[in-house]
Image (spheres, rainbow, N blue to C red):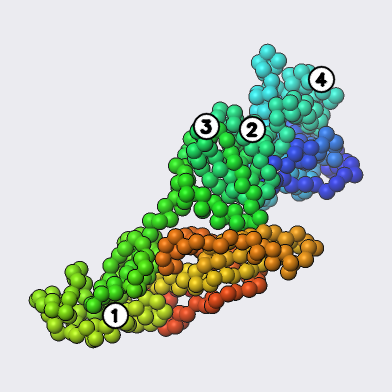
Amino acid sequence: MGAASVRAVPSPLDHQTTIDELGCPLHEVTFVVVDLETTGGSPSSGAITEIAAVKVRGGEVLGELQTLVNPGQPIPPFIAVLTGITEMMVREAPPIGAVLPTFLEFLGRNILVAHNAPFDVGFLRAACAAHGYEWPPVEILDTARLARRVFTRDEAPNCTLSTLARLVRTSHPPTHRALDDARATVDVLHAMLERLGSLGVHSWDDLRTYTAQVTAAQRRKRHLADRLPNSAGVYVFRDRRGQVLYVGKAKNIRQRVRSYFTAAETRRHVIDMIHAAEDVTPIVCANELEAEVRELRIIAEHKPPYNRRSKFPERVSWVRLTSERFPRLTIVPVVRDDAACYLGPFSSRDAAQRAIEALYDAFPLRRCTERLGPRTRRPACALAELGRCGAPCEGRQTAAEYAAVAASVRRAMTCDPSVVIDTAASRIRALANSLRYEEAAEVRDRLLHFLRAVGRSQRLAALAGCPQIVAVRPQENGETEVAVIRHGRLAGADRIPSGHPTASSIAAVVATAETPLAVGYGTLAYAGVEEMECILRWLEHPATRLVDVTGTWALPLPGFPASLPRLLSSARPVETRLVEKTSDAA
């Protein structure tokens, strides 16, 4: 045969099963069953002499491809006897380089099926590499490997194609010719899928799991996902006592939970969790924002042992400028209802300390820890001699003079960091000019920690300061997501179907939204920092539209020079990208 022979049957468009469609029913999955004849046992010593492929979906043959291939080398006599393919037959056949484009187009992005797939795929990959074709990112199903799990040794003492063909009584017996063998493989595949259907294997995800190396617990507990909804929301794994083990969120709860019972799940702590899990509780949410927020709240409340993040939102640090006669900077774990000024939250105490150092570089604040009263008199420390402190402890600085310094610090912490920036920039420039790059980098790092905190603090405070924000985000399917935020807490969320009256639906969401109660003071009085930052990301998305804002939502950040990223990068040029990203966020 001089050219590829392709027989197509009228059918719907080929469907590619993607990662998001692993739960696709098997009758909707397109398989391309491939078989090769070669001159040898490996790509290094042999070449392809015939290639055939049969495309099937739902038990129906959609098309066939078959062609002889000129291997460009002699065909060993025993191969010619086995396959019936002689050198005379392939003399006028096209080389593999001319056949590959047709084959790859026929394959598309569908599931490639072969009996002893490593052999056939190895030859095809080598041919693609040799002729400059990119191997497509297709899923591969080995019917020989699947047969070892489907049939017992009593039924099939071996899993050769001829043995399986006799066992399932295929209508196309294998003959060591590519098309006949591909057709026989199709019959064997359909026979195995029919048997697996009674074992609960109904989707491509089920089939991948059945052939993959998964733990017994994963296989045994796949039923936990059977009755879960195909909706966005949160899922909660629990043990036999009802204790929460693990919490996650998903666009499709059922599909996501099913993935925990496949070979795709390799995290050791999650596999351990599956061994202990006895139930999965779904919480359907109106949209992805609500799902993300609910996940954070449940994790914070129950602190599941197998979740590795968001378990301790209370473990943050704040920089506090005290409200005493001579204020000083301290690091505290919570915001209190006092007249002090707070900066944060910081994710670690070390980050808070670096921000304090940036303030000390810019302002002559006292660093002693005791309270200073009107009559306190004691010798000043070395900082006073260096000009880094006004020495109020020794009486050199009055309370009014010191109050002016404290007011400048308070302004830098809350709205205008320009003095801190200018001071740090001057030091960085001087140190860099003196080739003292390590010291310059330390100053830069202090400034970055301070600026991150100022930017974060302002964004969170602005959101928390609004009694109510109502926002919507249109979806591509015509639906509209609605969110009601009160003092930085998600108070209500819904999804308005396409065609429904938007104004009245939004009003209903607002009317039924919760009225949050303060559980603390300051920025995080109503919601945790992770929830607020999650809401901010949603609000700042380009597609989000504000419907109503009660209060003022603004972000003042004067004194931030455009040249700062370039200046900071001079301390350590290799980290320019990190500096620019941080400065934009601030």
- The alpha-carbon separation of the residues under discs 2 and 4 comes to 33 Å
- The alpha-carbon separation of the residues under discs 2 and 3 comes to 15 Å
Question: Which amino acid lies under the numbered mark 2 shown in the image of this protein?
Answer: His
Label 4 or label 1, whichever comes before in sequence order: 4
Q: Are marks 2 and 4 in contact (CB under 8 Å)?
A: no
Q: Position of residue 112 (x, y in %)?
A: 72, 39
Mark 4, mark 1: which one is toward the viewer?
1
Give the residue pinned by disc 3.
240
Mark number, residue 53: none
Give the residue pinned by disc 4.
169
Label 2 or label 3, whichever comes before in sequence order: 2
Question: Which amino acid lies under the numbered mark 1 shown in the image of this protein?
Answer: Ala
Query: Is 30 located above or below residue 382 in the figure?
Result: above
In which quadrant of the rendered image does the C terminus lie? bottom left
Label 1 or label 3, whichever comes before in sequence order: 3
Is 160 or 246 nearer to us in this picture?
246
Is residue 121 among what the camera can see?
no
Question: Which amino acid lies under the numbered mark 3 shown in the image of this protein?
Answer: Arg
- Tell me: 529 left or right of 316: right
Q: Residue at x 74, y 21 (%)?
A: 164
Q: Are marks 1 and 3 in contact (CB under 8 Å)?
A: no
- Tell me: 493 left or right of 425: right
Label 4 or label 3, whichever comes before in sequence order: 4
Q: How many other residues sit within 10 Å of disc 3, few (<14), some (14-19) or many (≥20)? A: few
Give the residue pinned by disc 1.
406
Mark number, residue 223: 2
Mark 2, mark 4: which one is toward the viewer?
2
Q: Are marks 4 and 1 in contact (CB under 8 Å)?
A: no
Is 141 or 452 nearer to us in this picture?
452
Is 343 or 302 nearer to us in this picture?
302
